[in-house]
Image (spheres, coloured by chain):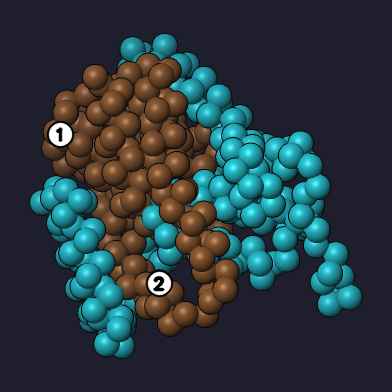
Chain colours: A cyan, B brown
Amino acid sequence: MSASAEEFTPPRTLTELFLGFLSIGARSFGGVLPWAHRAMVEERRWLSPADFTETVGLCQVLPGPNIGNASLVLGMRWFGVRGSIVAFLGLMGLPYCWVLALALLYTHWAGIPMVSAVVTGVGAAGGGLFLATAVKLGRPLAANPFALALIGTCFAAVALARVSLLLVMPVAIACGLFLARRGRL
Amino acid sequence: MILLELGLFFAVLSFLTFGGVTSVIPEMQRYIVDVRGWTTATDFMQLFAVAQAAPGPNVLISSLLGWRVAGFAGSIVALAAICVPAGILAVAVARLLERFHDSPWRAAIQRALAPLVVGLVAAGGYVIATPGAPDWRLWGIALGTAAASLSSRLNPLWLMAAGGVAGGFLL
């Protein structure tokens, strides 16, 4: 494997960049990240695994939709502003058309009680997947009382008290940074 | 000017989106349903279901909401507004940070954000599964799906399909 470490080469043309991101967006059932890794690291070999992890990691620390951010950052790195636009459009183009088509279909049939019940059930299941994600992400924090207090307060403020995120986010980030800098998180 | 208001709302959300779009779902629902009354909580939930069932980035829920509020122009405005402002920031920071990516601040920010993201993602799950008065059938589907997801390695698409079948029988 180490012999092939230098075989990673960025896309050479905007067309190649566009097609690469198109192939990510088109296939990404159940989360984009695994497909982004597959397309850019394994299939097209644009990025080394370490470079991929680092770029995605940066996009996760910064605000914004992670994978959207990653497409803009990588497009910019390889081709400047044109690259950003091309990568973003490639990523979003097909999924945008599909999700809108599906929504049109749903709206057309939503008057049928059975359709509405099934779609509501899918929505509830999607909510359940969020809960599972929260548990998975929260497991490493479960032994830390400060982290648990922060998790509980965020949940209660946003889900139960319905306080605006505009207020919750700055306060919670300030508390989190304070605790993290003191080694409590 | 509903497009302008929609664009401003999603542009502000753009900077509040940490750890993925899932963390701002409760705020989208609060503003679009509770504050503005642009649609109902049930419709919000069903649009969310459509967005989850289609392939692609989660952020496309914003284009469905924009579409519901202001048609095709709304779908483009909402998607661009939630992606571009934070994207410009990310591009700027990425160029700046390429030199010192081992900064202790980066690790501190990551540790500080982790509990917030957990709390907000859980809040998203709760809000989606509670589109009105608490309904044990919806909570049952949500908790059953969560348990199945945690105890197996099934593809989430199967779990959502199972939720749809359960919805068809129960609701």
Name the residue nearer the viewer: B123 or A41. A41
Asked whether, in this view, residue A73 is left or right of residue B42, the answer is: right
Q: Secondary structure at mark 1?
A: helix
Looking at the image, tell me whether mark 1 or mark 2 is earlier in sequence order: 1
Subunit bearing disc 2? B
Q: Is residue B34 above or below residue A79?
A: above
In the rendered image, the quadrant that contains the N terminus of chain B is top left
Q: Are marks 1 and 2 in contact (CB under 8 Å)?
A: no
Residue B84 on image: x %, y %: 45, 41
User: Which residue is the extreme one toward the bottom?
Assistant: A183
Q: Which mark is residue B110?
A: 2
What residue is rendered at 17% in x and 26% in y?
B37
- Identify the amino acid type marked 2: Gln
Q: From the viewer's perspective, is the residue at label 1 or at label 2 nearer? A: 2
Real-space CA distance between mark 1 and mark 2, rounded to the nearest whole angstrom = 32 Å
Residue labelled with disc 1 = B34
Q: Amino acid at mark 1?
A: Asp
Q: Is residue B96 left or right of residue A122?
A: right
The disc label shown at residue A156, or none: none
